[in-house]
Image: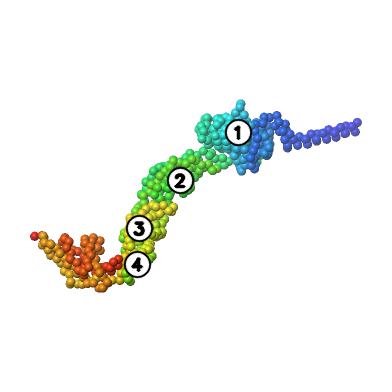
Amino acid sequence: MNFFENKQNRVITVVCLLIAIICAYFMQNDSLFRGSRSLSSETIGSFEQLRKDVRKKNIANYFWDDLKPKDLLIEGDSVFTGAESSVTVKLSNGQLIVVAPNSLIKFSYKGKKMVLDIPYGGVQLENVVDDIIIADCGENLDLNKDQGSISLKKSEKCGSVKIDTKSVVNAKNFEERKTKKDIATTFDEVAETGVLGQIEKFFDAASVTPTSLSAPHLENKDIKYEVSGENPQVLKWSVVDGAKSYEVDVSNTPDFIQVDPFKTNANQLTLKKLSNNMFYRVRAVGFEKAISSNSEIGQLTVTFPRIKMDKLKVTKEYKAKNPRDRGIAGTAVDVSWSKVPYADKYVIELIDKKSKKPVRKTITRELASALEVPRTGKYSYQVRALDTRGRDISSSDVGEVVYNKVFNILAPLIQEGINDKFYFFQKNAAKYVWLKWLSQSEEARKFRVEIARDKDFSAIVQSSFTAKPKLLVTEQVDAGEYFWRVRSEEGENYSSWSNTEMFKIQINNN
């Protein structure tokens, strides 16, 4: 009797151990249960373009499974994507849904409408095929079909859904909803601590920032600025909620073909370089590469001061050795001018007066230059200021460069005592003045005489030619003080000017 009882006890013990082992196995691996359930559940889609850490589970299951490319999407499945992961879900109706990184999405149906319950994360839908419901803490947002591309993001906070779409969404304003409900009570399977590892890492609100940003509003769209010094100009715009920085495009044309890009954390930008006409627009930049549309286009019209040249007329002479000597080619004349604020460089152009063609161009960052003159003659020159992009911002008046060839003919000599310095005439009597000089060169065939009111001969009242070393001034001259000089000429060659003499005319008006 004891023998049979002992044998029976051993059998019972073995059976209990086997049952315990089998139960432990199924507790660690419930794939058989999941497999039988999956076969009986409705398949609503499949997975494509799987990247890195993506997992899924059904509400009836406890554990999360690593997602495989050939896995099917069953109604009620939840999908989780890691920090650098994503997956494309293809529904049975052909709808493609891209699940963004750091997302937790539950797929189910309400009637004939797909329901996307999003505790946190984001999805992107291309060409909405059928109406879709977005569940947010018990409230629904309806997305109508045929809306084109839709990008949707949500933090773990209730009412934080952000939608970026060009179509009108038929829904309540989720921005106005301030309901605060623990995320685990809305999506209770997430509360199974330890299943996903450090769940709090994926609930970081900073990593799931909304993408919808308003475009900045410019403080002044039409700015007029007259430059008087190196004072920078400041562009300002409104602060955008959710923006961490701003991108500013600056261009010299309203089509922004060529752009100078800037980035700033403040709602203003200080321009350290200016040009004549500047156009600008601003975008707000948020987290996770979120960016707003462009603001309206602003215009900054800048007026720069004119360039002032130190000498509007520059003269240089070349002393030729014979009548056939045409002068030294490539001689230089010194020109200088005033500074223009914000100018990067200056361009000096030399233009032949006869041909009207430019013959020399010099570029410098200095306020003076040795301007090369190719040959004797008369030239026009002008200075232009350029900005850093090579655009004109200011210019000078047109000046003159005269490069004279002086033939080796001695200048005439006006001797003291051979001319009267004072003339006294009656009111109605004719006024005649003799001017005489000595020729010091046998080659001299003709003389030019200039009479002026000042010693610099800037106000010439008479210029005459004569073949003799004297001149009778027959033109009626007014009372006053006059200065005169003479030079020898032979064809295109001429001497230097003689010394300057003065005469004075007095008239008796009685």
Q: Nearer the viewer, mark 3 or mark 1?
A: 3
Q: Measured from the top left, where is residue 437 in percent x and y? A: 21, 70
Query: Sequence-wise, which precedes: disc 1 or disc 4?
Result: 1
Q: Measured from the top left, where is residue 3 in percent x and y? A: 90, 33
Dot 2 corresponds to which residue? 256
In the image, taking residue 251 as reference, residue 209 lies left or right, namely right
Query: Sequence-wise, which precedes: disc 2 or disc 1?
Result: 1
Query: Sequence-wise, which precedes: disc 2 or disc 3?
Result: 2
Would you call the spot at circle 4 few (<14 residues within 10 Å), some (14-19), or many (20 or more)? some
Give how far apart the Cα atoms at labels 3 and 4 are. 18 Å
Dot 4 corresponds to which residue? 326
Could you tell me which quadrant the N terminus lies in? top right
Give how far apart the Cα atoms at labels 2 and 3 are. 39 Å
| Residue type, label 3 | Ser
- The answer to whether residue 51 is visible is yes
Q: Dot 3: what SS? A: loop
Q: Dot 4: what SS? A: loop
Would you call the spot at circle 2 few (<14 residues within 10 Å), some (14-19), or many (20 or more)? some
Dot 3 corresponds to which residue? 355
Coloring basis for residues: rainbow
Give how far apart the Cα atoms at labels 1 and 4 are. 87 Å
Residue at the image point whose x is 64% and y is 38% from the top: 48
Q: Dot 2: what SS? A: loop
Query: Sequence-wise, which precedes: disc 3 or disc 4?
Result: 4
In the image, taking residue 273 as reference, residue 456 lies left or right, namely left
Q: Measured from the top left, where is residue 19 in percent x and y? A: 79, 34
Q: Measured from the top left, where is residue 46 in percent x and y? A: 65, 35
